Amino acid sequence: REMAANASDADGDGENTDRHDSGSGSKAAKLYANIAVDYNAAKSNPFKRYVEEPTFASAVLGLGRPNTAQHRSSSDTCSVHPCSALSGQHVLDLGCGAGHYCRILKTDMDAAIVRGVDISEHMLAGAEQQETQTPLGIAYMCQDLLVPSAAANIVQTFGPPEKVDLVTAEYLIPYSANAKELRQVCTTAAALVKPGGGRFVSIVSLCSASIMSAHTDGHLESKDLGWAATWEGEPHDGMCVEMTLFAQNESSRCTFPNYLWSKESIEKALRSAGFAQVEWVSMVAGDNAPDVIKSAIDDIAKTPVGVFVARRL
């Protein structure tokens, strides 16, 4: 539980020293060196497969609606399916892990160029293995995304274009242990996105109403969706929780720490970095979801996960 201490100074730049002794990025790299196999197995997790992926697709394809509306039926959202929505576009996936979403962006959405960046050599080894087995022309690099030089290093390694049409990130922001790191992630994304309409689409764990209304030393879970969150102390913006994902039929599990930030804190960091518009997309079950998932509307609503689309004007 080394990484499960509460984050400090949600509004300021306070250092969380238990995590910064060897650097936030290096600890994340060590974490995924230990859990890479279990984490990849958890891709069969019901929430990730039937809610997260279709919602991410809706956001990327521009089909998602602001989540001020009521939750929609599955017929109102898209499943991941082949299309040409990103034809001709250059995409950069930050915190790409083993390249799961990189391959979706390339094969299902027809992105012209996809590149992935992650701090974990173990996760990238899985991505490279997949690329070797089924070549798609996806390039990967190892880089700590919580350091100020990240954007410059990425451009130097990959070369042109320096600015891409779309930056994506799946659960990268939840590794920001304090507000300074949160701003740094957003600044890195902004530095890599084209001005004049370039987008940053990200899946994030959230300090949500369901978390904030839970008890001290809390526990929140959904058996149907296959996840659980546990934490110590009073819930607060920037808190650290241990997230557990269960594979389909609970055949395996994977537990890892996440720092949960509120939508307000994330939006503040995004606007500070140069994004002019931020929209949150409702989490909904896809058309291919089993009935037990489609009917789990309350569980979907309480899941502390969100997807946003931020634009540079």
Image: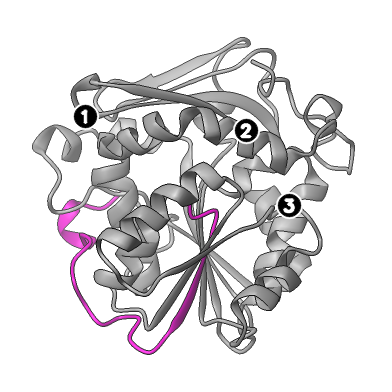
| Predominant SS of the magenta segment | loop
Q: Nearest the camera: 236 or 70?
A: 236
Q: Residue at x 71, y 65 (%)?
A: 188
Membership of 96 in magenta stretch: yes
Q: Which residue: 78% across, 55% down?
A: 147
**Residue indicated by mark 1:** 248
Say what amino acid the circle numbered 3 marks.
Leu
Measure how far apart labels 2 and 3 are at the Cα level.
15 Å
Residue on which the image places disc 2: 30
Q: Nearer the viewer, residue 143 or 53?
A: 143
Quarter of the view holding residue 14 = top right
Kind of element beneath mark 3: loop
Amino acid residing under circle 1: Gln
Q: How far is mark 2 from mark 1, CA to CA?
A: 26 Å
Name the one closer to the observer, 116 or 313. Answer: 116
- Look at the numbered discs 2 and 3 and tell me whether their residues touch, using CB distance below 8 Å: no
Q: What residue do we see at 23% from left, 45% from top?
A: 50
Is residue 51 visible in the rendered image? The answer is yes
Q: Position of residue 98 (x, y in %)?
A: 42, 50
Residue at the extreme top of the image, as rendered: 217
**What is the span of residues highlighted in magenta in the rendered image?**
71-97
| Residue that carries the numbered disc 3 in the rendered image | 146
Total number of numbered discs in the rendering: 3
Depicted 306 relative to depicted 38: above or below: below
Up/down of 178 relative to 213, above or below: below
Q: Residue 94: say if magenta.
A: yes
How far across and down, in percent of the image, does residue 122 sit?
Answer: 50, 42
Residue 259 seen from this side: no
| Vertical placement of residue 81 versus 240, above or below | below
